[in-house]
Image: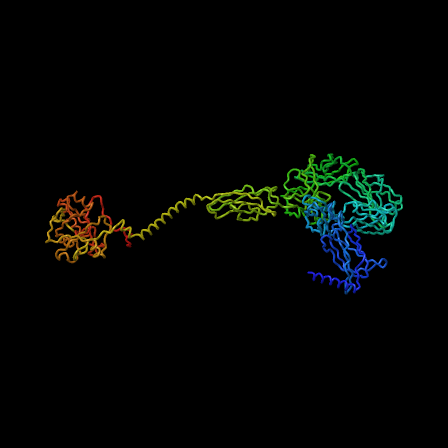
Amino acid sequence: MQGWVTLALLLSLGVKRSLAQNGLGEPRGLTLNPDLPAQTLSLAWQSDSTLFDLEIFHTEFMNVVLNATVEVQADPVTGLHSWTWHSPLPLECTSHSVRIRARNQQSVSQWSPLQTIPGWDIPEKSYMFPEDKMIPVGSNMTFCCIVNEKEDFKEIKYGRQEMKATRLSRRSYAITVTNQPASDNTGTNVICSSQKFQMLTGTVVFVGYPPGDEGLVCETRDLASAECSWKKGRDTHLRIKQSLTNYTLNGRDCLEANERKTWCSSKMWEENWTLEARNPLGTVQLTDSAQLTDRVHLLAPVNVAAVKVEAWSATLQWSWSVAAYKKLEMVCQLRLFAHELSSTRNYDGPGLSSVVLEGLWPDVDYTVTLRCGSKHSFWKWGDESAPYRIHTKMDRPDALDVWMWMDSSNTGHVFWKPLSVRKSHGALNGYEVSQSSAEEDGRNTVSLPPGNFSYPILLNNSSDVTVAVAARNPAGLSQPSTVTTPAYRADSQLSVSELLGTNGSFVLSWEPNVSASSGYVVEWFPTGCTGLCPIDWKKLPESDRSFTVNSVYTTTACSLCAPLLISDSLVAGVRYTVSVYSLYTSAPTLLQRWQGYSQEMIPSQSVSELSLNQTGSDVLLSWKATEMKQQRGFIRGYTIYLASAAHLDLIANITDPAVQSYRVKGLTLSSYKFVVKAYTSAGEDAGATVAIKMEMDTADMLFVGILVPLGIMFCCIILFSIFFYKKREWVKKAFYPEIPGPKVSGDWSSPRGPLDVKPSPHSLVHIVKNPEWDFTKEGLFPVPEEEEESENDNMEVDTDSDEPALLRYYNQVVGDGSHSNQVSDSSASSTASMGSTQTEITYAGIQSPSSSQGAYSGGGYRPQMQSVTGPAEPQIEFEADFQDDGLNAGYKPQCSWQLDSPEAENFSGSLGSPTSVTSSQFLIPESSEEKPQPSNTWFHNFLSGKS
């Protein structure tokens, strides 16, 4: 350790020896001179060098604030080197220490001893710096807060914004605010607080602008002195007394000038002027130069009065408060105000003090103001005098604008327009109306009060009537205005053209008329009005061929002193009748007439009397147009809609307004709602609604009532037929089971034809309970249905019999006699049949509901016998023999076969014959109530599939 200390001492001695050898001595006599308000620190020292290294510290923490190399020349008189440092931090915030050393290109000297200026961060009291500082907008500034030993620092706020603080020493803290905005009238507060106190200490900073005044102008009011004025610039935002702007004019203080008053006066005129405006943040200079006669601004005239007032003129006088004005060439301007009219007149002359006002209107109140200015090198108008009132005298009224309106062929009204204030020339006392005609001598004069603007007249059919109207005031009567009654022309008596409005007006044009020597008259009034209509007109010279009826027009009043409907404009949606008359020495002649709307609107009401009529599936809609007052435009057509729940479906658009009905065709049976709307060029009205529930006509209902049941029945028949045809086998088995046919054992060769069986005494059938069977004789034997069906598949079976299908029995043929050839007569057939009946037959247990009843009631078996084709004699003989036998019960064959029957074509068919004793059918006793039925029916054939 001692070795290292020894080495450090040797190195320091070597450095000192090296510095001494270089010849650079450390700066001497370093002194510090602080300027606290300016936050500057001035350094002064002595040295032979001109290049120095400077270091400035915050003493307590030895934080380096500045480390710079500067070149400073020595003052030739004092030999001192001086250098000033501007501190960003108020020097009061903490102590600062400074040291310096000389330098050249090869070496540096030793540092001078530290010099320190103490700060205010002492333990006794709390401070905030800088205090009440004024800075320009956009500046950066550092604020510091010094707290005493007993307080704990918390924060620093700039206005309402909390700032981040930096610690400078044990008791000093600083914040830096950049680009500061303009402060309000009382400045911006910077507050330092501790943990214990919300406001421990604080300061105020004033952020503003230097003066910004401009536009210096100097002028003279009395041709001797000067008054200079300027425009105030932007607000400096500095309100404390020491920060207000101060003004000087040509080096003289302008005590009257301030923030609100921007002018300054001088008792003498100087051709060159300089104004200087200064505040703590800066200074601005304004200059101006001019000749005296170029900047004359006259004062206002005084003692203005009217010395002579007439109906059409007045003389006005005034005086000047400055004597020098009497020789000055000047120009004066008079402004006249009457009601809502105004006019300006200019007069000139040396020292002007009176003028004559021409072209005034009688009985009018005028207000006059006057101002003057230098005529040569005019600078500006002088001050204006106080208003002065003049009332002119009365004069006779101007002639009236008169027109006559005919409301029938022999009645009409004379109208005249009220005179304006400028034309009445005084308050009117009334009107005088005189009427004359060629047939009457003289005039009939009537006096009317001033509130009347019309008068009714009665016309003479034989001659025209001329009416003259004059206005009266206290000064006298006006010139009479005359008008001759025009011929009455109703709208139906001439062609009325359609007139379309343009921007709320009517634009008219017509062909010139050679008889219009006195010009034309355009007349318009609401169409369809009754009584005294609000009529208006305009008289035009004969050179005019067009005219625009503007929105604003004058109004008239009725003869009973009640004013007509006053309207300031052509009312939109009102139809007007516009006519053009040519004026001549005689009565006016109607040239052309129009009807139109200045502006069309949608109809105010829907169509009226909307109705409908159903004809079959069609509906006829009919309606009537609304009245003209509610149309509010030319009806261009009608639209018909079908209304649904959510919207309207357009059915038809009728473009002809004369058509007021429409037929809707092909409607189904349902409920419908129809909407009919009239439309103008402005759009559709709200629409009228009518509803209908479609019903069927009586004829249609009858027709449908007949056809529908028939159609349903026919469909059912077809469906049932199809069903039974598909299920014919099942139906046949369920409702009409097949009865097995008789089966013949052996070979039967009996001839075809009807079988004539004659009863014999031994052919009776006896029913016994226990018959004794003689095996030596052939008899009946049962044949099962299965064998029968297999052996007789090709046999046609009669299935129309009503007897139940029990056992079927067939005869066995005995001998060859049964196989004899077929004979053609009935006797042979009977003989063969008789030969076959020699067999002993016993019926055991064979019963049917009908046969059993017949057998027991008659006492024996009795076949039902009918006539057959053959000789009549055997039949009669058979019947006679049968009757002679006197037997009530006997065999009666059911004979309905004929020789030409289709069933007789084969032998197997004869087996089923009811006349055969070998028949497989049950023989039913004949009943007097029953009749034989055909065995085959169409229903049977249909079910069995036969044709």
Q: Depth check: give the residue in front, 599 or 321.
A: 321
User: Where residue 123 sits in the image (x, y, percent)?
Assistant: 73, 46
Q: How many marks?
A: 0
Q: Residue at x 23, y 46 (%)?
A: 931
Q: Depth check: give the residue in front, 32 or 740.
A: 32
Q: Residue at x 72, y 62 (%)?
A: 6
User: Where residue 162 sits in the image (x, y, percent)?
Assistant: 68, 48
How is the model colour-coded? Answer: rainbow
- The reply to whether residue 39 is in sight is yes
In this view, 534 is above or below 945: above
User: Where residue 779 sits in the image (x, y, percent)?
Assistant: 13, 52
- The reply to whether residue 518 is in sight is no
Q: Is residue 782 left or right of residue 598?
A: left
Image quarter where the C terminus lies is bottom left
Q: Is residue 258 left or right of residue 164?
A: right
User: Where residue 482 sits in the image (x, y, percent)?
Assistant: 74, 40
Q: Depth check: give the residue in front, 544 or 268.
A: 268
Image quarter where the N terminus lies is bottom right
